Amino acid sequence: MLCDSVETLRGVKDVLVGLRPDAAIPDRVLGVSVRGNGVVVFLEGCGDREGAEARKNHLVFIPVSESVPPVHRGIRLDELVGCVVAAPDGRQLGRIGDVYDLPGQHMLGVSTDAGEILIPLVNAWVREIDVPNKTVVLVSDELFKVV
């Protein structure tokens, strides 16, 4: 689940739970708790251990209206995960594995053969974002030349 804070997540009540969006079933959030580095979401359909085990490895889907609002060029951060990152000449440089919300700006965590490279999600670095084709084109591949 992508959200901007635990408080936002606590505001979500109606969700869908399943292995895929098209096979998910409605459920209701009863509560949210922070435990160590993780967040535990208590669902109405998981009232006991057996109910919880039945949902193991399932995903929780929330309505777009309750998701993180668009933050860059009308795009939600979760839409960028999985996008191919390309150089201006079209060469594939890596794939976005995560988006980090840092104090100065959002950073794209781009997975490459050499490891993860952080790219600022700002116009000076990102020339084009094509969500339908899952592609992000950079202004320059300068950061990838030092790896």
Image (cartoon, helix red, strand yellow):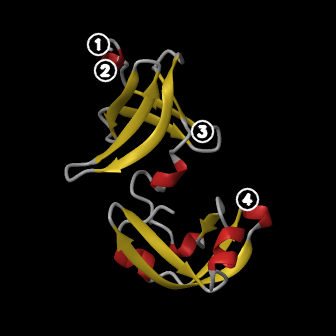
Q: Which mark is residue 143?
A: 2
As drawn, is 142 to the left or to the right of 104? right
| Residue in the foreground of this view, choosing between 93 and 88 | 93
The three-letter code of the residue at mark 1 reads Val
Gap in angstroms between the C-alphas marked 1 and 2 = 6 Å
- Does label 3 or label 2 sit earlier along the sequence? 3
Q: Nearer the viewer, residue 99 or 71?
A: 99
Query: Which circle, 2 or 4, is nearer the viewer?
Result: 4
Q: Secondary structure at mark 4?
A: loop
Question: Which amino acid is tagged 2?
Answer: Leu
Instruction: Compare marks 3 and 4 and give the one earlier in the sequence.
Output: 4
- Disc 4 residue type (three-letter): Arg
Q: Are marks 2 and 4 in contact (CB under 8 Å)?
A: no
Q: Position of residue 47 (x, y in %)?
A: 62, 86
Q: Earlier in the sequence, mark 2 or mark 4?
A: 4
The numbered dot on residue 134 is 3
- Mark 3 residue type: Lys
Give whichever of discs 4 and 1 has the lower sequence position: 4
Residue holding disc 1: 146
- Could you say where residue 122 lies in the image, as x and y percent from the top left? 31, 41
Q: Do we see residue 45 in this rendering? A: yes
- Vertical side of 12 occupied by 121: above or below: above
Q: Disc 3, disc 2: CB below 8 Å? A: no
Closest to the camera, between mark 1 and mark 3, is: 1
